[in-house]
């Protein structure tokens, strides 16, 4: 799951979109969010700096979705529909990358995932981002 260079390969489900990403703080930045879109999407994400994602193949296959303020894009494969990454609204110099798209990584690799309060987004409230809770994965014996 970890690499020496910090650069990780990833792709969508069908393989039409392939990319490399340099995570800002490896997997120390993982999280989920409670906003309406993230709640339905259900992805665990890790952060990458602006310029930290390099699409190697299929950039023309990526499509995007904007909602609420329309200020950021959420990218997904137009063929298989898998969400790959999005620009963060609270810090537009960061991208959140779907860890399930990274080679050899599963969201179930993380026993605890912080869940951030996206319903009461810091850009809407003017208050610091609040942690809404923790998502736990407890494997069956």
Image (tube, helix red, strand yellow):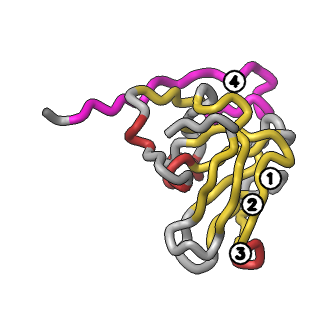
What mark, if any, has residue 58 been given in the picture?
A: 3
Q: Is residue 13 left or right of residue 85?
A: left
Along the viewing direction, whichever of 80 and 74 lies nearer the viewer: 80
Residue tagged 2: 66
Badge 2: few (under 14), some or many (20 or more) residues near its Cα, within 10 Å? few
Looking at the figure, which quarter contains the C terminus? Answer: top left
Q: CA distance from mark 3 to mark 2?
A: 20 Å
Residue tagged 4: 129
The first of marks 3 and 4 along the sequence is 3
Q: CA distance from mark 1 to mark 2?
A: 6 Å
Badge 1: few (under 14), some or many (20 or more) residues near its Cα, within 10 Å? some
Tell me whether circle 4 and circle 1 mark residues in contact (CB < 8 Å): no
Q: Is residue 49 left or right of residue 19?
A: right
Q: Position of residue 58 (x, y in %)?
A: 71, 75
Tell me whether circle 1 and circle 2 mark residues in contact (CB < 8 Å): yes
Give the label, 3 or 2, closer to the camera: 3
Residue tagged 1: 72
Q: CA distance from mark 4 to mark 1?
A: 18 Å
Tell me whether circle 3 and circle 4 mark residues in contact (CB < 8 Å): no
Tell me whether circle 4 and circle 2 mark residues in contact (CB < 8 Å): no
Along the viewing direction, whichever of 35 and 92 lies nearer the viewer: 92
Residue at figure coordinates x 50%, y 68% from the top left:
13
Residue at figure coordinates x 52%, y 42% from the top left:
44
Residue 106 appears in the picture as rendered: yes
Q: Is residue 114 left or right of residue 109?
A: right
Q: CA distance from mark 1 to mark 3?
A: 20 Å
Span shown in magenta: 117-139
């Amino acid at each position: 799951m970890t690499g020496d260079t910090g650069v990780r390969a990833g792709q969508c489900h069908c393989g039409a979109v392939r990319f490399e990403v340099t995570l800002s703080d490896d997997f120390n930045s993982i999280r989920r969010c409670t906003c309406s879109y993230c709640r339905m999407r259900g992805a665990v994400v890790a952060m990458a700096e602006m310029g930290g994602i390099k699409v190697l193949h299929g950039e023309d296959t990526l499509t995007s979705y904007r909602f609420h303020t329309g200020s950021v894009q959420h990218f997904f494969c137009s063929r298989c529909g898998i969400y790959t990454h999005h620009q963060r609204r609270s810090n537009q110099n960061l991208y959140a990358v779907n860890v399930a798209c990274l080679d050899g990584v599963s969201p179930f690799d993380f026993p605890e995932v912080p869940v951030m309060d996206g319903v009461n987004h810091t850009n809407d409230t003017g208050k610091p981002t609040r942690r809404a809770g923790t998502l736990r994965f407890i494997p069956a014996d």
